Amino acid sequence: MDCRDYSKPVSEPRAVATGSCHALLIKTGIGFLLRYHYDPVATARGSDTMRIWIDLANSPHVPFFRALIPEFVARTHQVEITARDFAQTVELATKAGMMTHVIGGHGGGRLTAKAGNLIGRAAALRKWARDRGFDLAVSHNSYAQISAAATLGIKTVTLMDYEHQPANHLAFRLASRVIVPRAFPAVELRKYGASTRKVRRYDGMKEDVYLADFTRDPGFAEVLSKLGVASEDVLIVARPPAREALYHRFENELFDELLTHLSSRPNVKIILLPRSDAQRAEYESRKFSNVIMPPEALDGASLIGAADLVISAGGTMNREAAALGVPAASIYAGKWAAVDEQLTREGRLFRISSRDEIESLSIAKKTGLNPRRASHVRREIVDLIVGTL
């Protein structure tokens, strides 16, 4: 059980581990500006102002909430942020200019350890939040925050886009409002205890929130060149399975077979983004000649925008590619999310589920981007969140 006191805010950037979430990282100057504007001490609280507590439990939550915070601030709401020291969550948040209170860490791969970690972090969050006068707690299924807020009588909003996560049982029952994509099956909401009155839906997917206004960075080609990726190379960005995640309690050998297959292709460079130090060490030991694991974090949106193909055994990175119109393939061996099935029907995502499909995979330079540009999703989600009170 992790009950260490991480309650002091992180104000200085730390080195970001390679294999970070494919996130939008803003420049330092904008980061300081953002910090100033959502600092709850910076402005007096008006009669219509809410105090909003956001918890970042995993790396993909950073770009999502970084895009929403200016919308909250524009409506005069005050925001404080907690973060779990897991994966690259804290590092990415710091680099994005989000001043966080770091509370709790990773619980490990065993179910008993995860349960103990959840209880310990929920207790630490409750202690931290108790006297802060929050009106609303918001997260993307942070089970510890939802549990802590419920014991304090704080209304909670959870957002979720994967209907096969077992811990939805906890989050959906305790939350005051559950916000999901329109593709999320109603039967799964009922199964996890989300009553009709608390559910709200939005069009699109969470990745639209922070990628709808993406523009290419003309300097990113130089970043790739320094890594050894030439303009004529076919660039593949790949992400291994999250083997320790609660929703991934099975083996997925197909990804490693795919990597071996691609490593022998001429004019192909693979940027591999491991999820942990252990994964990094594992793939380094295989000494693939065309596999690159960057020594520092890259701008995720720029990386995906530059790729000719994105292959992931998870969900977020594939959906980021789909949002930008980059060819994307899922090699996830578990149950697919309805939002991913929808992307498949739209022709923005395809599935790799067999060795034959690996052999027949088309490897070529892409012709250009075809972004969704679903800019309405950000405003729609903010409306649904602030409408909880």
Image (cartoon, rainbow, N blue to C red):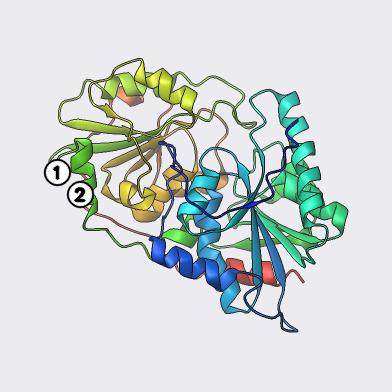
Label 2 and label 1: CA atoms lie apart by 8 Å
Assign the N terminus to one quadrant of the image.
Answer: top right
Q: Is residue 227 above or below residue 305?
A: above
Residue 221 marker: 2
Residue 31's x, y, as percent?
46, 63
Total labels drawn: 2
- Quadrant in the picture for residue 344: top left
Q: Which residue is mark 1?
A: 231
Residue at the spot x=72%, y=83% of the render? 46
- Among all residues in the image, which is located at the extreme bottom? 47
Q: Which residue is at a point 40% across and 66% down the rendered structure image?
A: 29
Return the x and y of residue 156 as percentages of the image width and height.
76, 59
Q: Is residue 59 visible?
A: no
Q: Amino acid at mark 1?
A: Ser
| Tag 1 secondary structure | loop
Image location (x, y in percent) of residue 126: 81, 50
Tell me which label, 2 or 1, sits earlier in the chain: 2
Please name the residue shown 61% across and 79% down the image: 75
Secondary structure at badge 2 equals helix
Q: Is residue 220 left or right of residue 143?
A: left
Is disc 2 in contact with disc 1, using a CB cutoff of under 8 Å? yes
